[in-house]
Image (cartoon, rainbow, N blue to C red):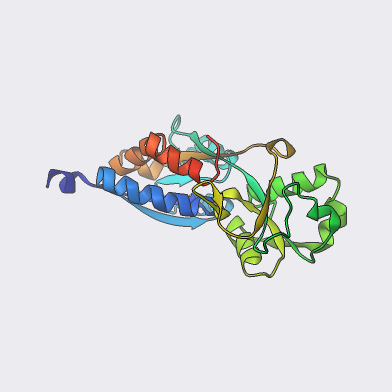
Amino acid sequence: MVGAVQAAEVSVAVAANFSVPMQKIAAAFERDTGHHATLVFGSTAKFYTQIKSGAPFQVLLAADNQTPALLEREGLGVAGSRFTYATGRLLLWSRQPGLVDDQGQVLRTGKFEHLAIADPKLAPYGAAAVEVLKGLGLLAALTPRLVQGTSIAQTYQFVATGNAELGFVAVSQVFSGGKLTQGSAWRVPAHLHAPIRQDALLLVAGKGNPAALALLDYLRGDKARALIRSFGYEL
């Protein structure tokens, strides 16, 4: 009864690539603490605009580290609360078994019509994909085949529905328990793009909310970290 009285709720803006891991973490968080996390998924760029416009989010789990840092500088985040909760990994993926080889040579053979990426102006995973293509010397040749999603979630949908034969997605979208769930993939070597550091931030609206503070602590704990790793993120 005491736990029920003390339980609180926190509104969390969650980067699209982290949607499945966060659903599992939120369920475990509620079981372990009694607090409830209400999750909203979307692009970090759109969340930034919404928070600037007064959206009542209390915690941001971003797809990058620049946006939380900017919000902190602008006084919309609580100073000193920001930390990296995960480092994302990029994956070239197709739902077709055997299409993508484990070295990514399919990008050079050109046995596809469409390559999906997230909008590099909005999504860190899209910016990383462009960096990879530039580094491989393939950007100019493949630009006519690129199909852009507004977020990494939409990019995944392009590939999952077959509208694009392959695309650059987040490892977390097609890995579970450390294994590829379907299709074929190339795990892009980390040295081919800048690290995709994903930062958490306590927003001013969440200051003093026990559920918000507890959630940020929980994300640093062993149980959450094990879940995050199981979806292919690095810590």
Quick check: 224 left or right of 126? left
- From the viewer's side, name the closer residue of 186 and 205: 186
Give the image location of residue 6, x and y in percent.
19, 44
In the rendered image, which quarter is residue 166 located in? bottom right
Residue at x 43%, y 33% (from the top left corner): 81
* Percent x, y of residue 132: 76, 45
Left-right relation of 57 to 16:
left
Quadrant of residue 38 within the rendered picture: bottom left
Up-down relation of residue 194 to residue 137 (above or below): above
Q: Nearer the viewer, residue 99 or 64?
A: 99
Regarding residue 35, the answer to whether it shows in the image is no
Residue 113: horizontal and vertical position, in percent?
79, 66
Instruction: Give the residue displayed 50% in from the left and 54% down from the top.
Output: 50
Q: Position of residue 214 (x, y in %)?
A: 32, 39
**Residue closer to the observer: 158 or 66:** 158
Of all residues shown, which one is farthest toward the front? 98
Is residue 154 among the parts visible in the rendering?
yes
Say which residue appears at 72% left-offset and 35% top-offset: 191
What count of labels does the image hold?
0
Vertical relation: 21 (above or below) 199: below
Which residue does the image show at 17% across and 48% down from the upper left?
4
